[in-house]
Amino acid sequence: MAESETLPAWVDVGALEGLGADTPTARSAGGVPLVVVRRQDDSVVAYLDACPHRGVPLSETGRVLEDTLVCSVHFWRFTLPEGRQTHLPDICLQRWATRVTPAGRVEVRAPSPP
Ligand code: FES
């Protein structure tokens, strides 16, 4: 069983206030590393923290440029919020559902198994 299958439906990953706008930030949900990005409009996106190219953590190598998340190692770009590679759209980041509670907490939910 994958680790994410054992997680509760929604997992708190911290306060919205703790996320800088358009700053990829490392978070963990039940031991699963995530990269979380708060957009300028306070929407939040979360992905497995691994570039599909070489597996490096996008929380360290990623930069937001316009509506993309760019891995600075080889400059693969992923659309926000979908997480699709801009030139190879069959390659996607593993996207997690996100929500912000009325108390300003960011919660994530693991994707359903395919
Ligand atoms: S490791 Fe991310 S683009 Fe190559």
Image: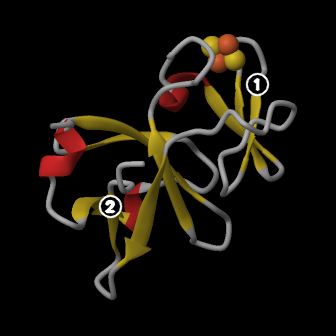
Instruction: Confirm if mark 1 falls within 8 A of ligand 1.
Output: yes
Q: Is residue 39 left or right of residue 89?
A: left
Three-letter residue code for mark 1: Trp
State the SS at label 2.
strand
Ligand 1: which quarter?
A: top right
Three-letter residue code for mark 2: Arg
- Image quarter in which the N terminus is found: top left
Q: Which residue is mark 1?
A: 76
Residue at the image position 22 percent from the left and 61 percent from the top: 11
Q: Which residue is mark 2?
A: 109
Say if 57 sits above or below 14 in the image. Answer: above
How many numbered marks are there? 2
Say if 25 sits above or below 100 in the image. Answer: above
Residue 52 x %, y %: 58, 23
Q: Residues within 10 Å of mark 1 (few under 14, many from 20)?
A: some
Residue at the image position 76 percent from the left and 24 percent from the top: 76
Instruction: Confirm if mark 2 falls within 8 A of ligand 1.
Output: no
Give the mark nearer the N terminus: 2 vs 1. 1
